[in-house]
Image: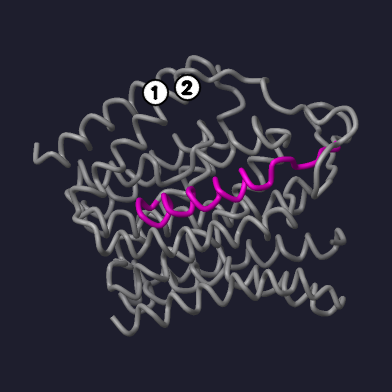
């Protein structure tokens, strides 16, 4: 995993925290609960996006077992979301 | 901004600062504070805890991945276990009666008390000599002034611990690092900085997996989670800045008393006062 990629991972994470934090703050003070909710969902999405980014990186390099591990994590989260909806 | 919102923000800030000083993460103090002082139902409190944990983990990981302290390959493998655990824990949280979840949290706090009281630094891997094991990595440690190389042993123990930590995370709204870091450092041969950074890295997606389950069950309160998460982010940033200047043994023992009090209160609450 090259240094440039790990640095870009760091940037993705920081951007996710900053953007979602800003949305939550703006929603709490000005724009209302829907923006707050969206900000929370953006925060939850941030680490999930991080997993997808690592998976895509390995897929591009043809390292399918590592890409598969990321896909497994994403699939588990998707399955739990789908299961929850049916409740 | 109501007074209640202000107090929630401050509570988040305080728990975030304490967590950063002790290296314990947001949930362990935040969830009991919400339950005991703000009368938040345990599930909403745990949901808020997960959101706070995602925020602090992502903020810290943003820095740690840049430094090369995170063993990303190990993290990816262990994440399959923590995420499976978090989903299980999240569903358990929905199925179990509230008092049982509160009681489980009290038990966790009792264990954390012992861990804090008996803190024996320096018994784990130091990252010198020939690295044994898998996922061999190296990083530069500025405190030691040299490159540290290590390998990870006893991967099965790490996976089992990761699954258990994931369950705790999904059930209680904590990060789970309090279990993973000692095992990775004392048992699997990782230097403490690599263990802590890798654990922190994993906690983000672990918390997210749990939070998805909570959101699907309608147990995530966005306003509560939002205010508290902002407070925890602010507090942990502050706590991380002042932590290096504090005497570590005295601080840990002082907070062991705090976790003991919280443990007793949570256990009493679970037994119906």
Position above or below: B228 against B122: below
Q: Residue at x 75, y 57 (%)?
A: B73
Say which of A6 and A25 sits in front: A6
The chain identifier of the residue carrying mark 2 reads B
Q: Secondary structure at mark 1?
A: helix
Horizontal arrangement in the rendering, residue B192 relative to residue B205 (left or right): right
Task: Tell me where residue B110 appears, x and y as whole percent.
Answer: 34, 29
Name the residue that disc number 1 marks.
Answer: B256
Position above or below: A84 against B270: below
Q: Residue at x 65, y 76 (%)?
A: A71
Same chain for labels 2 and 1? Say yes or no. Answer: yes
Task: Tell me where residue B31 appears, x and y as whole percent.
Answer: 32, 47
Cβ atoms under marks 2 and 1 closer than 8 Å = yes
Horizontal arrangement in the rendering, residue B15 relative to residue B180 (left or right): left
Task: Tell me where residue B215 appears, x and y as whole percent.
Answer: 35, 72
Q: Is residue B36 magenta?
A: no
The chain identifier of the residue carrying mark 1 reads B
Q: Which residues are magenta?
A: B149-173
Horizontal arrangement in the rendering, residue B29 relative to residue A4 (left or right): left
Say which mark, if any, is on residue B80. none
Name the residue that disc number 2 marks.
Answer: B252
Q: Secondary structure at mark 2?
A: helix
């Amino acid at each position: 995993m090259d240094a440039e990629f790990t640095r870009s991972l760091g940037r993705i994470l920081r951007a996710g925290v900053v953007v979602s934090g800003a949305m939550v703050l703006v929603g709490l003070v000005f724009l209302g609960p829907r923006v707050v909710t969206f900000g929370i969902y953006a925060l939850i999405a941030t680490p999930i996006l991080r997993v997808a980014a690592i998976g895509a990186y390995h897929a591009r390099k043809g390292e399918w077992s590592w890409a598969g591990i990321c896909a497994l994590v994403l699939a588990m989260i998707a399955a739990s979301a789908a299961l929850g909806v049916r409740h | 901004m109501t007074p209640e919102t202000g107090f929630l923000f401050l509570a988040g800030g305080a728990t975030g600062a304490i967590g950063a000083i002790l290296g314990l993460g947001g949930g362990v103090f935040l969830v009991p504070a919400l339950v005991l002082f703000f009368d938040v139902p345990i599930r909403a409190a745990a949901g808020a805890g997960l959101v706070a944990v995602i925020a602090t983990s992502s903020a810290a990981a943003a820095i740690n991945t840049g430094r090369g302290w995170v063993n990303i390959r190990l993290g990816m493998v262990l994440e399959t276990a923590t995420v499976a655990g978090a989903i299980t824990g999240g569903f358990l949280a929905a199925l179990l009666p509230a008092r049982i979840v509160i009681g489980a949290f009290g038990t966790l706090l009792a264990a954390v008390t012992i861990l804090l009281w008996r803190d024996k630094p320096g018994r784990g891997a130091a990252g010198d000599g020939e690295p044994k094991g898998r996922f061999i990595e190296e990083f530069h440690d500025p405190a030691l002034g040299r490159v540290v190389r290590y390998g990870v042993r006893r991967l099965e123990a790490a996976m089992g611990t990761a699954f258990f930590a994931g369950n705790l995370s999904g059930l209680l709204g904590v990060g789970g690092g309090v279990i993973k870091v000692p095992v990775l450092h004392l048992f699997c041969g990782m230097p403490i900085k690599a263990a802590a950074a890798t654990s922190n890295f994993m906690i983000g997606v672990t918390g997210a997996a749990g939070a998805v389950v909570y959101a699907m069950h309608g147990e995530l309160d966005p306003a509560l989670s939002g205010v508290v998460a902002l407070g925890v982010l602010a507090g942990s940033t502050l706590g991380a800045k002042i932590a290096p200047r504090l005497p570590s043994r005295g601080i840990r023992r002082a907070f062991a008393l705090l976790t003991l009090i919280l443990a007793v209160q949570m256990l009493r609450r679970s037994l119906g006062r």
